[in-house]
Image (spheres, rainbow, N blue to C red):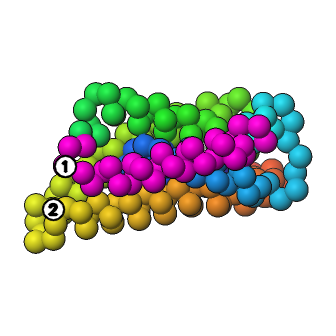
Amino acid sequence: MGAITVLRPLALGMATGMRSQLGLAALAVAMSRGGGKKGRKGRGFSSMVQSQVLSSPLVRKSLVATAATELVADKLPSTPSRLNRGPLLARLALGGLAGGLLGWSDERGLPRAVAGAALGAVGAGLGAFGGHHVRAALDERTNLPDRYWALAEDVTAVGLAAFAVAVTDDSDSEADAAEQHAPQFSFAG
């Protein structure tokens, strides 16, 4: 598994940890635009996830609307902490789901989906805790109101989600194939 293969679900999970609805919304938008598949035809579960679920205009619009609502609701003083048990568990589950779907959408089978789910959940934990603590530290150490740090966190989360869905694993696949076909030398002494 190459670096991009690991970074994509991790980044999508981190975005989900910061803004819980963002990972699935980014996947839905990417899938509706072709998801970077470069003309490959999918089969089975992967194809169903892409063509019937995430690419559905109703699902895409709903996910984008909930993500946009969360971006606004995050700035409200009545919004509970993402580190409370319920919101944290939801972020971990949604990060795992997003990472797993990213693995399935790559059409590399169940092991890639399971690895993507695990990396997505880990990323969600990192995003939730890291985003909360960095934002709190910046708020405490600067004279800027928290809403500015919340906007910076929004931009970071959107950037991570965009990276996760825009970059493909093709470069890792090509590197792995080249490595497998390269001559092997042994220096036995």
Q: Is residue 58 left or right of residue 6?
A: right
In magenta stretch: residue 66: yes
Q: Position of residue 5 (x, y in %)?
A: 63, 49
Tell me the crowding category of disc 1: few under 14, some 14 to 19, or many 20 or more residues within 10 angstroms, Cα based: few
Label 1 sits on a secondary structure element that is loop
Q: Which residues are magenta?
A: 51-79
State the image quarter where residue 37 is shown: bottom right
Q: Which mark is first along the chain, 1 or 2?
A: 1
Q: Is residue 189 visible?
A: no
In magenta stretch: residue 126: no
Label 2 sits on a secondary structure element that is helix
What residue is at 27 percent from the left and 55 percent from the top? 75
Q: Position of residue 89 (x, y in %)?
A: 37, 29
State the image quarter where residue 125 is shown: top left
Type of the residue with mark 1: Pro
**From the viewer's perspective, is residue 96 above or below residue 126?**
above
| Figure disc tally | 2
Q: Nearer the viewer, residue 108 or 42?
A: 42
Structural distance between the alpha carbons of marks 2 and 1: 14 Å
Type of the residue with mark 2: Asp
Q: Nearer the viewer, residue 185 or 124?
A: 124
Q: Disc 2 vs disc 1: which is toward the camera?
A: 1
What residue is at 24 percent from the left and 63 percent from the top? 147
- Residue indicated by mark 1: 77
What residue is at 56 percent from the left and 61 percent from the top? 163
Q: Main secondary structure of the magenta part?
A: helix
Instruction: For the N terminus, give its image quadrant.
Output: top right
Q: Position of residue 113 (x, y in %)?
A: 65, 34
- Residue indicated by mark 2: 139
What residue is at 72 percent from the left and 52 percent from the top? 32
